[in-house]
Image: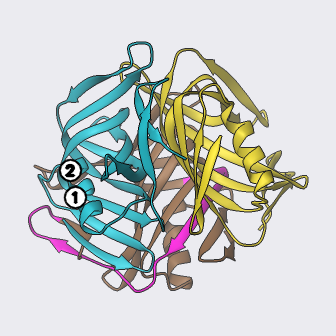
Chain colours: A brown, B cyan, C yellow
Amino acid sequence: MRHVRLGDSYLVRLDTDEEVVGAITRFAAEEKIDAGSLTGIGAVRDIVLGYFDRSAREYLRQTLTGEWEILSLSGNLALKDGRPFAHLHVTLGGREFQTLGGHLFEARVGATVELVVRPLPGYQLRTLDDATGLYLLDL
Amino acid sequence: MRHVRLGDSYLVRLDTDEEVVGAITRFAAEEKIDAGSLTGIGAVRDIVLGYFDRSAREYLRQTLTGEWEILSLSGNLALKDGRPFAHLHVTLGGREFQTLGGHLFEARVGATVELVVRPLPGYQLRTLDDATGLYLLDL
Amino acid sequence: MRHVRLGDSYLVRLDTDEEVVGAITRFAAEEKIDAGSLTGIGAVRDIVLGYFDRSAREYLRQTLTGEWEILSLSGNLALKDGRPFAHLHVTLGGREFQTLGGHLFEARVGATVELVVRPLPGYQLRTLDDATGLYLLDL
């Protein structure tokens, strides 16, 4: 991962084979980003997507094979149990330009992933919400 | 709906069962946001999507059943007839990680919807454009 | 194309029949935007999408017929060979609310395309990366 700060935001480039969600989380920890928003494009493989089943109170998970373009990666950064947590959703585009997507659990960088990370001043916590079983923004 | 202002932006969390487009519009009115941009992720149900048919000069509408992840919600805020108006497009992901999307007319919050709203200083109007039959940004 | 500057960002409206990627590139050149981020929604036709085949080190290209809603357009602006270059990915929604997407090579505006462009202070270069054959952010 490489990054540069331009004004209030970071341009970030992830390197081939890096795991995306872990890299974003480590970046937020190193830069002490306790709240923020994030968008990105690029290409990934070894992808694990999630769909939250509300009645079962758990995520269904799906692993994808092949390399996919990230058509959109978007989400936010907040603190969960005192550490940065990235809540990310992704739309993916395949070789036939077909699309799939969901909650992003993990993915490995293909040719490149390019992010714009915008820290927000202050901090934001996530806490466990009994009604859903999810760690929601504790606003 | 709950929100916190962090610097120039708001983090917003919509509550289960709230209608998304109405909640965003009311939020913009209460916070006097006369121009802005918005992104979001989360999950929704009772969704009404639109596709604008240019020759018919009207939106085709489709109601979706089931609960869908919001893979991306993006758009802008401006004033239409003196009141805040949110122009929003959405990509949705289903239980099989399949995707659908369109102009977002309405949707009800599932487990959560998380938004980053960035007001822009000043204001922006939408006015009726005769060529298309749409209220376009009056730049 | 019309635009207004509101604080640190531009609201941009492209006109029917304008080519999107060329218009964004010219806008960045005229406004001297040497780094930035961009999001957009709207509708387009005459679309050329790309999928980067890493082993072949080239983009597969696909032309789409019909008019499609832009569900999300996102990416960044940087300098390539001394001139602004927009790296853009897009998710598209069709008349049946089906979706497709990829790297955006070109598209012509349908009813409207609305962008929020946020320049970042300073500049960012893209240089040829031997490992991938792509012009990557030179961070």
Q: Residue B29, how many percent across, how many down?
A: 26, 61
Using the image, name the chain to which the residue with label 2 belongs. Answer: B
What amino acid type should be assigned to the residue bearing mark 2?
A: Gly
| Residue hosting label 2 | B22
Quadrant placement of the N terminus of chain B:
bottom left
Q: Is residue A19 left or right of residue C86?
A: left
The numbered mark at residue A83 is: none
> Horizontal and vertical percent for residue A25?
48, 72
For disc 1, the neighbor class at 10 Å (few under 14, some 14 to 19, many from 20) is some
Q: Position of residue B114 (x, y in %)?
A: 30, 61
* Residue B85 vs residue C43, the one in the foreground: B85
From where the camera sits, is residue B132 visible?
yes
The 10 Å Cα crowd at callout 2, few under 14, some 14 to 19, many 20 or more, is some
Q: Is residue A127 magenta?
A: yes
Contact between marks 2 and 1 (CB within 8 A): the answer is: yes
Give the magenta range.
A108-133
Q: Where is B135 relative to B122, above or below?
A: above
Q: Amino acid under label 1?
A: Arg
**Left or right: C68 in relation to B57:** right
Q: Verify whether residue C117 appears in magenta.
A: no
- Is residue A68 in view from this perspective? no
